[in-house]
Amino acid sequence: DINGYYTDHHHDDRYYTKNQTYTKNEIDNAVGPTPKVLSLGAIDFQPVSHSADLAYGYALPGGVRVDAGGAFFNAGLRLPVGSTITGVQVFLDPNGVSRSASLHRYRPLGPVSERLGNGSSTGGNVSEAIELGVDHTVEAGWNYRIDDILLIAGGAILYGAEISYLPPP
């Protein structure tokens, strides 16, 4: 009756000493903070400054399109104060007409508004990402939004956006 057998193993059983290891803070300082991504879908964008005959709906897979009239679509951002926005991409299909997008910050009681970045699509007919070219630290007392995305009947389809940021230290 045999229940098992002995075989030699092929790994090192030694452990590192405390002086041979790094602390979590030492690793974090050497590597830097981990970037985060805030994803917005088309549903997160709302029409503003629109024509009286505005009609819009969803376009597969997960986009929004305008069926009648036209409107600028905006989406507010909620990021922790002290976060550093390192990039913003807006995803759309321009459907043959170049479209632009911007990132603004504003003081609701100001009224003060500042453009932090903007970009434009090609005039192509395939989905693409508009890079807004942003490197900005979020400050207290300001609201942030992606805006200036004009959609008109039969035109571009908006799919959403991604905001890359580093959390506050």
Image (spheres, grey):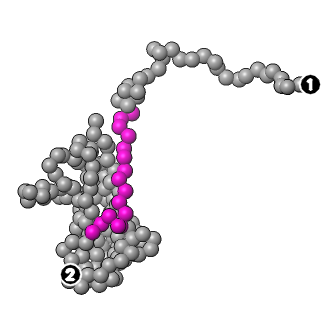
Asked if the magenta segment contains residue 18, the reply would be no
Decide which of tag 1 and tag 2 comes sooner along the chain.
1
- Whole-percent x and y of residue 56? 32, 78
Mark 1 neighbour class, 10 Å CA radius: few under 14, some 14 to 19, many 20 or more? few
Q: Amino acid at mark 1?
A: Asp
Residue at 24%, 76% (x, y): give it.
71
Viewer-side residue, 98 vs 103: 103
Residue at the left extreme, as displayed: 110
The magenta region covers: 30-46
Is 72 left, or right, of 44 in this rendering? left
Which of the 4 image quarters holds residue 31? top left
Residue at 71%, 23% (x, y): give it.
10
Number of marks drawn: 2
- Helix, strand or loop at mark 2: loop
The relative height of residue 125 versus residue 103 in the rendered view (above or below) is below
Question: Pointer 1: what residue?
Answer: 1
The tag on residue 51 is 2
The relative height of residue 135 versus residue 41 in the rendered view (above or below) is above
Q: Amino acid at mark 2?
A: Ser
Residue at 25%, 66% (x, y): give it.
74
Is 13 left, or right, of 41 in this rendering? right
- Helix, strand or loop at mark 1: loop
